[in-house]
Amino acid sequence: MKVYEAINWGAKELKGVCDNPRLEAELLLAHCFEINRTALFLRREEEISKEQLERFLEFINMRKSHIPYQYIVKKQYFMGLEFFVDENVLIPRPETEILVEETLKRLKRGDVVLDIGTGSGAIAVSIAKYFPDCTVYAVDISKKAIEIAKHNAKKQGVLDRIFFIESDLFCNLPPNLKFDFIVSNPPYIKKREIELLQEEVKKEPIVALDGGEDGLFFYKKIIREAPFYIKSGGKIGFEIGYSQKEEVTTLLEESGFKDVEIIKDLAGIDRVIIAEHKL
Ligand code: GLN
């Protein structure tokens, strides 16, 4: 079978499975060859080896069973950086880049930042990479997530500026440590809405999605404890789900946070909330 024939076949197999079957077939085949799509195009008349074909078949079958493309190729780009991802971590979303960008705009030299629920390390690693004059702490309850985040930090050359700690929220942080900036993209989907999610999303770790009955479980916990871990004048920034703006604003104000700012994503949905802790 030639390259272009394999692409045609793969595209047909993926029809109805994803929005862009041809593109995904091309990318998956390119991944088998360990080359990019352009290079694949140049080899479209070449014969495929038996091993490559088998690999391609396996990838197509994985995709047909709704395994996200990013888990098959084991990577996702975030803030222009390549992150390793697998089924132990949430796939970083483009919307989350807004949280990172808004945080970067507000950081000051020497700031100490905490990323809660770091997952793949997307937020912590990007902050450390694009704001070299800060120290980052990154926590996650999942040991496997911490390993992956460390791997990603190493790949981006920022491992020496991020302290990774396996911790249920603030639990295992060093005592008396206070932060200038706390960021988090916590699980915020309402329990009953999880079953309605796309099949692909349901392949992501449930602990990264499940925000409890009202979707606010982690905002409540983090915001309640944050005043003990944040400097006066320090800031907190969250990604939020659609329709969570009011509730999270109230939680912040009840905990002594002021100057609440909301930033919308490109679809016009309230996506990021930032507030300042003033005593
Ligand atoms: N912080 C990670 C991200 O934004 C993981 C978030 C999560 O698992 N809820 O991609």
Image (cartoon, helix red, strand yellow):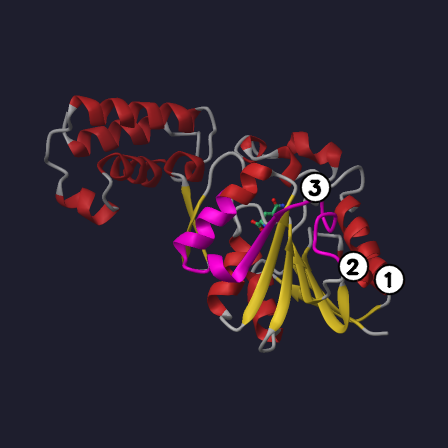
Total labels: the figure holds 3
3D distance between C-alphas at marks 1 and 2: 8 Å
Q: Quadrant of the N terminus?
A: top left
In the image, 185 versus 69, the foreground residue is: 185
Determine whether, in the image, residue 260 is placed left or right of residue 50: right
Report the residue at 82% width, 74% height from top.
278
Find numbered disc 3 in the image and state the secondary structure of the residue it sits on: loop
* Of callouts 1 and 3, the N-terminal one: 3
Is residue 40 visible from the viewing direction of this image?
A: yes
Report the residue at 76% width, 65% height from top.
230
Badge 2 vs badge 3, beta-carbon distance below 8 Å: no
Give percent across and percent down for residue 131. 51, 70
Report the residue at 52% width, 53% height from top.
122
Is residue 90 visible from the viewing direction of this image?
A: no
Give percent across and percent down for residue 175. 75, 57
Q: Please, what is the three-letter code of the amino acid marked with disc 2?
A: Ala
Q: Residues within 10 Å of mark 2 (few under 14, many from 20)?
A: many
Residue at the extreme front:
175
Reading the image, the residue beneath label 1 is: 255
Q: Which residues are magenta?
A: 148-175
Single out the mark in the foreground, 1 or 2: 2
* Of callouts 1 and 2, the N-terminal one: 2
Give percent across and percent down for residue 268. 62, 61
User: Is 200 rendered above or below residue 110?
Assistant: above
Reading the image, the residue beneath label 2 is: 226
Reading the image, the residue beneath label 3 is: 189
Find numbered disc 2 in the image and state the secondary structure of the residue it sits on: helix
Q: Please, what is the three-letter code of the amino acid marked with disc 3?
A: Ile
Report the residue at 38% width, 30% height from top.
15
* Residue labelled 2 has its Cβ within 8 Å of some atom of ligand 1: no
Q: Quadrant of the C terminus?
A: bottom right
Badge 1 vs badge 3, beta-carbon distance below 8 Å: no
